[in-house]
Image (spheres, coloured by chain):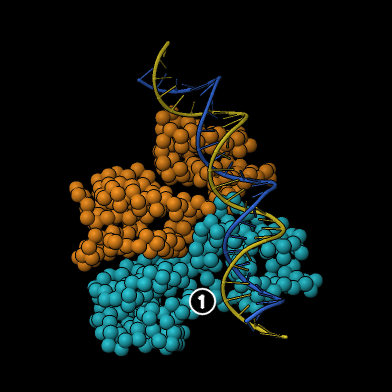
Chain colours: A cyan, B orange, C yellow, D blue
DNA sequence: TAATTTCTTAAAAAAATGTTAAGTAGCTAA
DNA sequence: TTAGCTACTTAACATTTTTTTAAGAAATTA
């Protein structure tokens, strides 16, 4: 049985990398092996993977930095980190980036295999991402989320900060519909707690200020649920 | 911000269990602590949980056996195992049952927290959230349970509170049929006792007030059983 | 009839949001 | 290097919304 699942393995130790690659190959995964973060990112961009296994400690570009870059391009691909030592800080950073798991070397290969299976067998998640679209028109505004510029018909235009931009983009993508708080927090702030939530409220206030140029547009709150960008 | 996520923690060491429970409680999770597999399964069946943390080594009924029973009833709830030693066999069995993760004692509490967040923040899988119905028509009303708006034909519309909304949704889904009190309490209040029951009565009264715009609709009480939304 | 359950209203308590401003950290240019 | 800029977070206080609790009346059941 061929699993036909494709895994990107980034590991700087060539011996260990080779052995791991062979082991996973025997178990019906298609493995692309990169020896450092730079090569890893190149390979990642060249083809489509189902999972990444990243060593954290690597020369040139470490696994966490690589993970961040990967997350910027693809926000849902599962990431497994390998740590040489049980460095708590690295582990926590990894989770913050959006790791699915981490393993401390030396680890048992069967356990890695079990983890991989467990992750890949998960039901596919809803992909909310719409990567290519970055120009939007709504109300009297046009909004370029790549340049982070919000322009009003009359000529006024605002440069948006990264967070303002992401939040507005999510609101616009869900125009007239609910943008759940948790979803936005986990996507933009990568964590949902009291403080990130308050921070989000501050950003909502900022966006409201921009949008008040068009009186027909409103960001309304659905108490306890989230926000909704709508037009009368 | 209240996370309102409910976790079933099954751990036979009372000291450790208590400390872990407190730690997670501080971090805004609602914890139900059971001291063995038998009690764990009882608690699991009594209310709705978002996640289970199971110690493997326990008297009477070990964590793996409990996990199997839980899986028979609920095939998607995330499971985290705690193992006293790094017993490979247990770990593999755990994954086979459908564990999301395991942690070897002693573990760092922050890491457990990161894992919990990571698991709970996963995007909802396709079959649960996405296909969810949230638009209903009944009597002279249309009801959007996502935006929590109940609209009467004449144009009147009400913003519903989260609890009003959930309760109405359950009534509508069981239109003309009995909605058992316990079911609703466990689902919405996540607990069935005297106080939640009184609270539910209050909400029933509120819903009746909204619905009286359409005289043909009624929420009738089935004494000792529950409520029934019906139309003459 | 006594015990239990439900109805209703009001008040109290808890939680979430709106808004402004101060604090902080990182970056950049003089 | 410092001063200034930007983005973001945190604090503080006001306000709104939601939920719980209490308590007496009414209804139902045994």
The N terminus of chain A - image quarter: bottom left
Residue A14's x, y, as percent? Answer: 31, 89
Left or right: A109 in relation to C21: left
* Chain that bears disc 1: A
Looking at the image, which is closer to me, A48 or B136? A48
One can see residue B18 in this view: yes
Looking at the image, which is closer to me, A186 or B154? A186
What is the quadrant of residue D29 in the picture?
A: top left
Neighbours of disc 1 within 10 Å: few (<14), some (14-19), many (20+): few
Left or right: A181 in relation to A151: left
**Dot 1 lies on which element?**
helix
Mark 1 = which residue?
A72
Looking at the image, which is closer to me, B206 or B219? B206
The C terminus of chain A - image quarter: bottom right
What is the quadrant of residue B184 in the picture?
A: top left
Left or right: A96 in relation to B73: right
In the displayed structure, A12 sits above or below A141; it is below
In the displayed structure, B25 sits above or below A123; it is above
Residue B55's x, y, as percent? Answer: 27, 55
């Amino acid at each position: 049985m061929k699993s036909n699942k494709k895994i990107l393995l980034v590991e700087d130790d060539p011996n260990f990398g080779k052995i791991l690659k062979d082991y996973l190959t025997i178990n019906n995964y298609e493995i692309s092996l990169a020896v450092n973060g730079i090569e890893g990112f190149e390979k990642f961009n060249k083809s489509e993977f189902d999972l990444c296994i990243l060593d954290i400690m690597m020369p040139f570009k470490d696994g966490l930095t690589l993970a961040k870059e990967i997350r910027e391009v693809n926000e849902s691909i599962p990431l497994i980190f390998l740590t040489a030592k049980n460095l708590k800080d690295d582990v926590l950073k990894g989770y913050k980036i959006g790791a699915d798991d981490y393993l401390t070397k030396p680890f048992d290969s069967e356990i890695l295999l079990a983890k991989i299976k467990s992750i890949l067998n998960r039901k596919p998640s809803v992909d909310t991402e719409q990567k290519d679209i970055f120009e939007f028109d709504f109300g009297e505004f046009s909004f370029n989320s790549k340049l982070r510029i919000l322009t009003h018909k009359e000529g006024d235009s605002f440069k948006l900060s990264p967070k303002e931009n992401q939040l507005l983009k999510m609101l616009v993508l869900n125009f007239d519909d609910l943008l759940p708080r948790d979803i936005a927090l986990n996507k933009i702030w990568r964590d949902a707690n009291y403080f990130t939530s308050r921070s989000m409220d501050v950003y909502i206030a900022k966006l409201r200020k921009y949008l008040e140029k068009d009186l027909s547009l409103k960001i309304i709150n659905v108490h306890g649920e989230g926000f909704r960008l709508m037009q009368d």
